[in-house]
Image: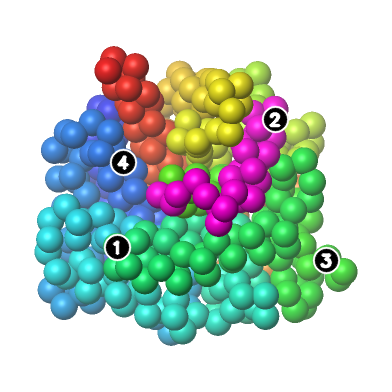
């Protein structure tokens, strides 16, 4: 089965991740469909996007199940589809909904250094996940509305988050606790203990998406250098399988396994990136292509009578959740359930495959 056939079937059978409530998991699929449509021009991807998102967006721009006072940064991510659909359809409800999300960000609590809290229930914490959830939307909204100060704020938040979570060699830990109150946070640095691959995947995708829509000028120069270092570090740590392990900084840890969602995120970021030099570009692009081919060859499998994308960590985080404490250690990340067809893996796989379609089109031209 071709990946595009799998994506088509996945979308036909897809059920809203949280019973129809506005959520980031659905947003991963929306982003994948948007990029597939832009890459191929095939109407089916836009049709899937409209069919899935429209029940969640009211005529007045209200969003199903959305509670802005939760200050959940995850809920911002699907807003990128609203901006795309406003531009593509002209339907005013999409931008009305986007304004509800930007209003959340305007009121969203921040640490003293200026970064958004991850959620109200995770006070004073910055997670790499949240950089992808909030900042690309903020930049795209600013470009759509001309509210350019939002771009400078997003770039500053990214720079600060990188400084707070860096552990050297292009690697960044999952989270930072400004209060040092959480047991997972280092009492001196506030950092969490390990480098979780999907957290790095969210980071890499946030960086390349933001830089793709902004000029290559002095305002983005430092961030572009940091992004290049991250992508080169990822290329160096790619396994012989073409994929990356669940815990990126502990490849030899017993039980560490090649994880699909992070590998798809890395594949996408590596292929979308605008590298600083031709040598970098060749190496970075080759790594992304190798990963995408490995995902197609090894992670699309027949299970339970249908083709599924396997090897996806269902969820991981920091601190209390569902009656247990997630301490952020390398062994912790190996305890989370591994599932098939989760939106957090399928969406980025769509994104990565869309980049291959763009590359083929560019080569043919």
Q: Main secondary structure of the magenta part?
A: helix
Q: Residue furthest right?
A: 188
Give whichever of 134, 54 is nearer the camera: 134
Give above or below for 109 relative to 168.
below
Q: Is residue 21 visible?
A: no
Q: Disc 1 designates what residue?
A: 144
Q: Nearer the viewer, mark 1 or mark 3?
A: 1
* Circles 1, 2 touching at the beta carbon (< 8 Å): no
| Residue at (19, 60) in percent of width and height | 86
Q: Disc 4 designates what residue?
A: 35
In the shown orientation, is residue 60 left or right of residue 247? left
Figure quadrant of residue 92: bottom left
Q: Position of residue 304 (x, y in %)?
A: 36, 31
Rounded to the nearest angstrom, the CA distance separating label 1 from label 2 is 37 Å
Q: Nearer the viewer, mark 1 or mark 2?
A: 1
Provide the residue span drawn in magenta: 213-236
Q: Earlier in the sequence, mark 1 or mark 3?
A: 1
Q: Disc 2 designates what residue?
A: 237
In the shown orientation, is residue 100 left or right of residue 328? left
Figure quadrant of residue 56: bottom left
Give whichever of 25, 232 is nearer the camera: 232
Q: Earlier in the sequence, mark 1 or mark 4?
A: 4
Rounded to the nearest angstrom, the CA distance separating label 1 from label 3 is 37 Å
Q: Position of residue 71 (x, y in %)?
A: 48, 78
| Residue at (75, 78) in percent of width and height | 179
Rounded to the nearest angstrom, the CA distance separating label 1 from label 4 is 18 Å
Q: Residues within 10 Å of mark 2 (few under 14, many from 20)?
A: some
* Circles 2, 3 touching at the beta carbon (< 8 Å): no
**SS class of the residue under badge 1?**
helix
Rounded to the nearest angstrom, the CA distance separating label 2 from label 3 is 25 Å
| Residue at (44, 76) in percent of width and height | 105
Give the numbered dot on residue 189: 3
């Amino acid at each position: 089965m071709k990946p595009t056939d799998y994506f088509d079937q996945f979308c036909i059978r897809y059920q809203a991740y949280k019973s129809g409530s506005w959520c980031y998991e659905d947003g991963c699929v929306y982003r994948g469909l948007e990029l597939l449509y832009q890459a191929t021009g095939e109407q089916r991807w836009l049709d899937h996007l409209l069919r899935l998102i429209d029940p969640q967006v009211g005529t007045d721009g209200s969003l199903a199940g959305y509670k802005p006072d939760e200050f959940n940064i995850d809920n911002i991510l699907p807003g990128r589809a609203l901006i795309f659909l406003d531009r593509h359809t002209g339907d005013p409800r999409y931008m009305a909904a986007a304004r509800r999300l930007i209003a959340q960000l305007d009121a969203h609590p921040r640490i003293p250094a200026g970064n958004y809290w991850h959620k109200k229930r995770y006070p004073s914490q910055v997670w790499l996940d949240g950089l992808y959830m909030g900042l690309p939307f903020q930049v795209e909204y600013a470009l759509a509305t001309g509210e350019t100060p939002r771009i400078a704020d997003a770039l500053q938040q990214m720079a600060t988050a990188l400084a707070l979570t860096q552990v050297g060699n292009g690697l960044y830990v999952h989270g930072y606790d400004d209060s040092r109150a959480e047991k997972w946070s280092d009492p001196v640095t506030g950092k969490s203990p390990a480098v979780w691959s999907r957290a790095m995947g969210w980071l890499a995708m946030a960086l390349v998406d933001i830089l793709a829509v902004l000029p290559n000028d002095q305002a983005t120069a430092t961030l572009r250098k940091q992004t290049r270092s991250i992508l080169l570090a990822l290329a160096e740590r790619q396994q012989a399988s073409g994929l990356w392990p669940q815990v990126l900084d502990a490849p030899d840890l017993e039980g560490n396994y090649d994880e699909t969602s992070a590998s798809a995120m890395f594949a996408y970021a590596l292929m979308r990136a605008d590298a600083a030099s031709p040598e970098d570009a060749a190496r970075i692009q080759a790594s992304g292509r190798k990963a995408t081919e490995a995902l197609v060859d090894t992670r699309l499998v027949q299970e339970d009578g249908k083709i599924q994308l396997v090897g996806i960590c269902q969820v991981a985080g920091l601190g209390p959740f569902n009656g247990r404490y997630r301490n952020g250690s390398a062994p912790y990340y190996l305890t989370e359930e591994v599932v098939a067809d989760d939106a957090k893996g399928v969406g980025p796989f769509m994104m990565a495959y869309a980049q291959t379609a763009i590359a083929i089109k560019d080569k043919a031209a």
